[in-house]
């Protein structure tokens, strides 16, 4: 589904990503794990077209994304839930979810897409008429992911969906993400803590200072000395 | 009581027109983050275009009742041509420093001034008869109010209500508000920003050209009216708060009424009074009366 190869990114002439390569297969859940400042957000933003890479290629089901705008990428079916959720405060919760059905037509009806979003995040239904500004951090995360479902994205980029949430909320969101994967969607998650990586992850990549230093299963990661050194497994 | 009422009516008339232009300025600033000095030119072009349209209407002996629809239509027609063209040009400075935006839009002001000079000449143009053709409303012994002023106030009110409804209740209005809030996120939600920008800019231009067209039966069209209006519109925006629609309304009322009061009571203070208020707002409440604090 997504092939990232040899990606290099420079921001203000400092090298942020170097030779980043990884794959996400159709229907897979893949996690990009790394400490703060490792380059996870930059990787997702580059995939989304906000940042232009200096070198390397990004392919979505074989299509080279080079030169494509963020809008083009969204139209191709990449959904993005940013680190700070970026819920639209001008709109209500329901409008935040409806908006991508106004702007992108897919084979699914708007109604179907909106229902799916609410079905995966049933809590949001109660807040439907609330303004986007009146939500807790967890609700904002949920809404931000729900929007990618309403967009009918086939590839979801989720930046730290469990970050800064109380331990009581995390299982709920983890469950919803699992449901999204079971719907057949492809998911790429950026995560700073190994213990937050869902155990149903197909593969994880560990990033350190803009480079991928490990790729493999979660179990392999727990045993890998490099990963231990970098992330310090607490499990 | 009579001077008071007079000040009120002419002040609200000024405010009504000012509000239209300031609302255009605000929405373009809100969505495109551009401070568009050329709003003054759109107002001036709207006025000259309106005069020409009126001259045609008079020549064809159309009834008075058609004048206002003709003025509005001429403003809209102008906006549909100017909006997308000028927006295309402004695209070069969207992500650049404000200096570039101000320089480019001020260059447009100068260019449009010359365009007006070429087509309509340098001396002011007037269409007095049209103003009086609308008649007057007697409000008491020896006191009348020009109907035209009341009609324009009514139209401005209708436009601002319609505008508010459009932004609050329609899908496109919601898309516009969302884009103003967070354009980058909106692009990832499949909003075509370039389409939103063209539409919003054309809407902003239309508020200016229609405002200019509506003022023309009541006042002369002159070369410097554009620049004069820029000063007023910025006073409105500073007083009310940059980016705030209710702020534009309050600012327009303040500027319109203060100006009318100064003309009546002490004409030398007309501009000074407004600057004093602007300076007071900048010192005491820099975000404007209804602006969000930065
Ligand atoms: N716009 C920018 N300008 C300058 N440096 C940047 C910019 N964006 C990111 N960086 C730098 O790039 C590096 C990677 O940042 P990035 O946000 O991708 O990390 P991250 O892995 O997402 O970290 P976190 O876990 O804190 O979210 C950091 O050193 C950061 O300081
Ligand atoms: Mg990050």
Image: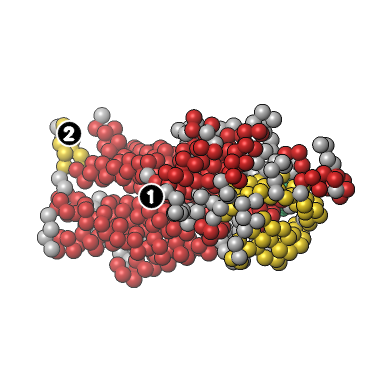
Disc 2/disc 1 C-alpha distance (Å):
30 Å
The answer to whether A150 appears left or right of A50 in the picture is left
User: Could you tell me residue B261's position as x and y percent?
Assistant: 34, 38
Q: Earlier in the sequence, mark 2 or mark 1?
A: 1
Reply above or below: A117 against A208: above
Q: In which quarter of the image is the C terminus of chain A?
A: top right
Give the class, few, some or many, for how many residues have Cα within 10 Å of label 2's Cα (few <14, many ≥20).
few
Disc 2 marks which residue? B139
Q: What element carries label 2?
A: strand
| Badge number at residue B247 | none
The answer to whether B185 appears left or right of B111 in the picture is right
Q: Residue at x 69, y 38 (%)?
A: A163
**Is the image coloured rainbow, by chain, by secondary structure, or in one colour?**
secondary structure
Reply above or below: B111 against A78: below
Reply above or below: A75 against B257: below
Q: Residue at x 50, y 37 (%)?
A: A118
Q: Is mark 1 on a helix, strand or loop?
A: helix
Mark 2 belongs to chain = B
Disc 1 marks which residue? B21
User: Could you tell me residue B39's position as x and y percent?
Assistant: 41, 55
Foreground of the two, A118 or B36 = A118
Q: Quadrant of the N terminus of chain A?
A: bottom right
Ligand 1 contact, mark 1 (Cβ < 8 Å): no
Foreground of the two, B163 or A10 = A10
* Tally of numbered tags: 2
Which residue is the extreme one toward the bottom?
B118
Q: Is there any visible trace of residue B232 in the rendered image?
A: no
User: Could you tell me residue A110's position as x and y percent?
Assistant: 43, 47
Q: Residue at x 50, y 62 (%)?
A: B91
């Amino acid at each position: 589904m997504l092939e990232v190869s040899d990606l290099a990114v420079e921001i203000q002439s400092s090298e942020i990503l170097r030779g980043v390569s990884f794959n996400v297969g159709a229907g897979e859940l893949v996690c990009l794990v790394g400490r703060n400042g490792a380059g996870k957000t930059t990787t997702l933003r580059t995939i989304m077209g906000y940042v232009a890479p200096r070198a390397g290629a990004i392919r979505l089901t074989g299509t080279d994304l080079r030169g494509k705008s963020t809008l083009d990428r969204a139209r191709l079916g990449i959904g993005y839930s940013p680190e700070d959720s970026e819920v639209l405060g001008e709109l209500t919760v329901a409008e935040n979810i409806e908006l991508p059905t106004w702007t992108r037509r897919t084979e699914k009806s708007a109604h179907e897409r909106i229902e799916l979003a609410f079905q995966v995040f049933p809590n949001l239904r109660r807040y439907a008429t609330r303004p986007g500004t009146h939500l807790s951090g967890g609700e904002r995360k949920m809404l931000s992911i729900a929007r990618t479902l309403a967009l009918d994205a086939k590839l979801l980029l989720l930046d730290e969906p469990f970050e800064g949430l109380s331990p009581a909320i995390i299982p709920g969101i983890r469950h919803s993400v699992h449901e999204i994967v079971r719907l057949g969607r492809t998911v790429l998650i950026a995560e700073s803590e190994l213990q937050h990586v869902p155990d149903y992850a197909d593969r994880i990549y560990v990033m350190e200072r803009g480079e991928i230093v490990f790729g493999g299963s979660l179990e392999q990661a727990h045993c890998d000395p490099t990963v231990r050194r970098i992330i310090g497994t607490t499990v | 009581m009579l001077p008071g009422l007079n000040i009120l009516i002419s002040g609200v008339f000024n405010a009504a027109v000012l509000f239209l232009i300031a609302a255009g300025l605000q929405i373009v600033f809100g969505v495109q983050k551009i401070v568009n000095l050329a709003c003054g030119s759109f107002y001036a072009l709207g006025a000259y275009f309106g005069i020409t349209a009126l001259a045609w209407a008079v020549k064809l002996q159309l009834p008075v009742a058609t004048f206002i629809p003709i003025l509005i239509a001429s403003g809209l027609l102008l906006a549909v041509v100017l909006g997308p063209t000028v927006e295309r040009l402004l695209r070069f400075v969207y992500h650049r420093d404000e200096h570039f935006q101000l320089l480019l839009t001020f260059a447009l002001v100068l260019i449009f001034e010359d365009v007006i000079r070429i087509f309509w000449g340098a001396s002011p143009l007037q269409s007095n008869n049209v103003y009086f053709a609308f008649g007057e409303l007697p409000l008491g012994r020896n006191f009348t109010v020009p109907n035209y002023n009341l009609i324009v106030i009514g139209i401005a009110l209708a436009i601002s209500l319609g505008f508010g409804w459009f932004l609050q209740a329609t899908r496109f209005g919601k898309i516009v508000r969302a884009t103003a809030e967070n354009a980058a996120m909106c692009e990832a939600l499949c909003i075509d920003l370039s389409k939103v920008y063209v539409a919003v800019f054309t809407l902003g231009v239309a508020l200016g050209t229609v405002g200019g067209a509506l003022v023309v039966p009541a006042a002369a069209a002159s070369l410097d009216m554009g620049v004069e209006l820029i000063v007023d519109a910025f006073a409105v925006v500073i007083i009310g708060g940059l980016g705030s629609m209710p702020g534009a309304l309050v600012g327009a009322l303040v500027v319109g009424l203060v100006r009318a009061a100064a003309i009546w009571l002490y004409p030398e203070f007309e501009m000074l009074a407004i600057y004093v208020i602007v300076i007071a707002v900048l010192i005491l409440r820099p975000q404007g009366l209804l602006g969000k604090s930065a």
